[in-house]
Image: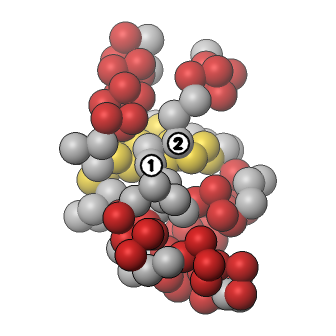
Amino acid sequence: MNKVYCYSRCTTCKKALKWLDDNKIEYKLIDIKEDHPDEKTLRKYYKMSGLPLKRFFNTSGIQYRELELSKKLPAMSEDEQFALLATDGMLVKRPLLVGKDFVLTGFKEDEWKAKLK
């Protein structure tokens, strides 16, 4: 079954969940703030996604801005970035959709449709 890491107050997450419900796609909802993926899991999702690691960061989030990560990430090693992501689910791009053999960050309807229909 698909897993969807979301934050309940995120409007993009709400849109994604509505889309899943409207399309009758089953999923397990995981609160990314309370039950965020650990470093090992993030590494697995990163490999499955084929995306650049930067796509896993919530670049519009408060923590991202407060920590000035736009300036710091380029100088950080991949290991440091994974360790940082694992500290707080609010740093992780959401929704995070995890399927059997794929991972998508954020909600782009066309991408979700291609993987789920």
Q: Residues within 10 Å of mark 1 (few under 14, many from 20)?
A: many
Do callouts 2 and 1 mark residues in contact (Cβ within 8 Å)?
A: yes
Residue 68 percent coordinates (x, y): 50, 78
Q: Position of residue 27 (x, y in %)?
A: 39, 33
Name the residue carrying label 1: 94
Where does residue 117 sit, x and y in percent of width and height? 61, 16
Residue shown at 52% from the left, 59% from the top: 59
Residue 69 lies in quadrant: bottom right
Q: Residue at x 44, y 11 (%)?
A: 23
Left or right: residue 112 versus residue 50 is left
- Mark yes or no: residue 70 visible: yes
Query: Image height check: is 12 above or below 46?
Result: above
Q: Residues within 10 Å of mark 2 (few under 14, many from 20)?
A: many
In the picture of the structure, the residue carrying the numbered disc 2 is 106
- Position of residue 72 measured from the top left corner of the image (x, y, whole percent): 61, 83
Q: Nearer the viewer, residue 107 or 115?
A: 107
State which tag comes first along the sequence, 2 or 1.
1
Q: CA distance from mark 2 to mark 1?
A: 5 Å
The amino acid type found where label 1 is placed reads Arg
